[in-house]
Amino acid sequence: MPTRVFLWMLFLTLATAAIPAHADSAPYLLQSGDRIRMTVFGQDEMNGELEVAPDGTVAVPLLGTRPAAGKSLAALEREITVALNEDYLVEPRVALQMTSLPPIFVLGQVRSPGSYAYRAGLDARKAVALAGGFTSRAQTTQVTVRRTQNGEAVTREITPDDEVLPGDTLEVERRWF
């Protein structure tokens, strides 16, 4: 039975990996200060909260420190599962979940500029709504987003329907006519 469950989880992972993501979106990459809840099913003593240290590592029970910064949550989950399976547990089922995410910042031509808690499924339009909506002088067809990807700051224009990631800074520009 556990083998079937593992194979089903593997199938779902591979099947969802084949679904193309939005061309401009990238998964959130872990960074120092992020907090993660780790659950190893059937191994209660291994369950707990992990924090990405300033050096970019997490301390995992049995495995010691593992590099985490710059990896997606799914990639780290796979690495931990494989490492536990190699030396410690038979067919471990590991689940990682973010317990805290960096806020987003919405600036410029919005009614209440500031920082706001990130929520899953957030797009630029919803982020602007959190900030009170566009002002009468706002450019409403595009938003400038700044985010860190692979350790580099990237700035680009997105539409209101594009996805926002934790830690993004959105700036709504002023329209000139």
Image (tube, helix red, strand yellow):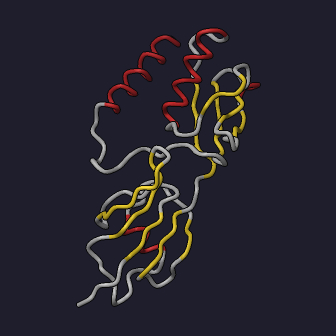
Furthest residue toward left: 177
**Picture coordinates of residue 146 (x, y %)?**
43, 61
Furthest residue toward front: 152
Q: In the rendered view, tell whether residue 127 sits above or below residue 70.
A: below
Q: In the rendered view, tell whether residue 167 sits above or below residue 129.
A: above
Q: In the rendered view, tell whether residue 117 sits above or below residue 131.
A: above
Q: Is residue 69 left or right of residue 135?
A: right
Q: In the rendered view, tell whether residue 90 sits above or below residue 116.
A: above
**Picture coordinates of residue 89 (x, y %)?**
64, 12
Q: Is residue 12 left or right of residue 95?
A: left
Q: Quadrant of residue 109?
A: bottom left
**Picture coordinates of residue 93 (x, y %)?**
57, 22
Which residue is rendered at x = 46% and y = 85% of the image?
Answer: 111
Q: Quadrant of residue 87?
A: top right
Which residue is rendered at x = 32% and y = 28% of the image?
Answer: 15
Q: Is residue 161 left or right of residue 166?
A: left
Which residue is rendered at x = 49% and y = 11% of the image?
Answer: 3
Quadrant placement of the C terminus: bottom left
Number of on-image labels: 0
Which residue is rendered at x = 37% and y = 57% of the image?
Answer: 163
